[in-house]
Image: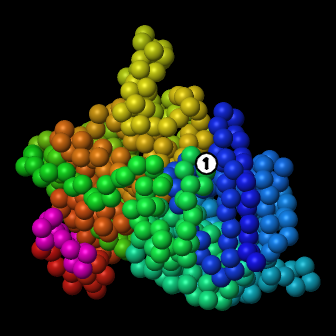
Amino acid sequence: MALLELKNITKDFPGVRALDGVSFDLNPGEIHALCGENGAGKSTLIKILCGYHPAGSYGGEMFLSGQKVFFKTLQDSEKAGLALIAQELALVPEFSVIENMSLGQEPSHFGLLQKDQAEQNCRRALEKVGLSVDPHTQVKDLGVGQQQMVEIAKALSKDARLLVLDEPTAALTESDSKRLLDLLSQLRQKGVSVVYISHRLEEVARIADRVTVLRDGKSVSTGPISQMPKDKIIADMVGREVKTFYPRPPAREGEILLSVKNLSFENPQVPGRKILDGVSFEVKAGEILGLGGLMGSGRTALLSALFGVARGKVTGTIEMEGSTLPPFNHPTQAIRQKIALVSEDRKRYGLVLESTVRENLVLAVLSKLTRKGLLDGEAIDLSCEKEVLDLRIKTRGLSTLANQLSGGNQQKVVLGKWFLTSPKILLLDEPTRGIDVGAKAEIYELLGRLTAEGMAIVMASSDLPELLGLSHRILVLNQGKAAGLFDEHSATAEKIMEAATAAAGKAKAS
């Protein structure tokens, strides 16, 4: 008997049918992967499964161990043994790791919170996922990848018999991803079932027993992993064949657009400890400079420092077009110098989720779209319509709220916002995190067009094949220092990882 059965699930939102007769089942001790482009209906399906969309708000039936169930809240599904790890992490940023881990299941004695027990439980859960952080640290001070690991540890602490994971490794390093996949394999042997959503098809091939593909709200194929090779999954996802290699743009000898020398800044929370320590590099017009390194190596910190949003005093120099400048201390200074940053957390830093596509696209250029001191609605619409067309943003219209778009289309809106500023240097932090195969191919194609037009791109990525496949040169960071610089001919996965993991001061450039 199947542990879980979803039969003919249908879900409508205003103006769109998100799910159209989807059926899905999961066996005890099975890992069943759910694949599809952003907007295919995956997240909607698991939100129905876990009670986020309550019984009565959708059509179809749900069975758990043969019994028909009606989940009206997330708590209902948790009581039935389900644990959801969604893309939007259910963590309270101002709470500590312990407080987040204990929320809703606080250990108490005679009504009094047992703090020692809560900390012990938290440390034990963190150990399961191999995360070494101070349990008293506020979640907002952790990186995105660390927050994801806290959420995973929190779910595992509930001893659920069915885990639902939505892009759990999107923000993780390769070593952390491997640790999680190994953990899921161990849980499967203990009878735990897993619904696993991932755009990383290599992970799906490694971990899944079966695969179901959704497209446009419908289930188009299901089968054992042995019968679902990568090419078939991709073709079923997008309804067409997609080139899955990484199309590095042709190298070109352009002028140096950005030269960074001895960039450093200290951790404001730990005086004396440097987040960046004397990093120097240059990037040319038409070049993609990749940033490699483990989580916490300084990649995001470097991009933040270049854009004027570092959380501390930055020292060093920046040279642009023959001028030597001090590090920027505000984004407006970077924008004036034609620098743009697409951050790793688009929902937190890239978008105003409750605002429309139109409002988000013109956020950085409002001053240019005015006439006699008033916003020029016609000019705004023309600019936005061009970006929607050029970037193939799937939206019902410019008045659609950003939070109603899929992750891939949200990322395109962020890119469109910065393209309206006509940047010469584009900083990308995990540009394809949580993006489906089709959207990745479009973004890769876009990067090729941008470099052909002479733009310089600095790209941080935890996806090693992506980093190797797209970058003309790769700068590896290790504990805030430059640990290696490799061109496209000398760069290999082994050399990148060796530089990223070497003891401080022992990595070599080539």
Position of residue 418 measured from the top left corner of the image (x, y, whole percent): 37, 38
In front of the other: 68 or 170: 68
Position of residue 314 measured from the top left corner of the image (x, y, whole percent): 32, 58
Q: Secondary structure at mark 1?
A: loop
The N terminus sits in image quarter: bottom right
Q: Is residue 494 magenta?
A: yes
Q: Is residue 54 left or right of residue 89?
A: right
- Disc 1 marks a residue whose amino acid type is Gly
Q: State how many labels appear.
A: 1
Residue under the image location 59 percent in, 71 percent down: 32
Up-down relation of residue 477 to residue 451 (above or below): below
Position of residue 76 measured from the top left corner of the image (x, y, whole percent): 83, 65
Q: Is residue 474 left or right of residue 398?
A: left
Up-down relation of residue 484 to residue 216 (above or below): below
**Residue range of the region highlighted in magenta in the rendering:** 482-496
Residue underneath mark 1: 217
Residue under the image location 43 percent in, 27 percent down: 384
Up-down relation of residue 39 to residue 378 (above or below): below
Q: Is residue 255 left or right of residue 346?
A: left
Residue under the image location 45 percent in, 50 percent down: 238
Which quadrant of the view contains residue 183?
bottom right
Answer yes or no: is residue 369 visible. yes
Residue under the image location 48 percent in, 54 percent down: 237
Answer yes or no: is residue 312 visible. no
In front of the other: 177 or 321: 177
**Mark 1 Cα shell of 10 Å, populated few (<14), some (14-19), many (≥20):** many
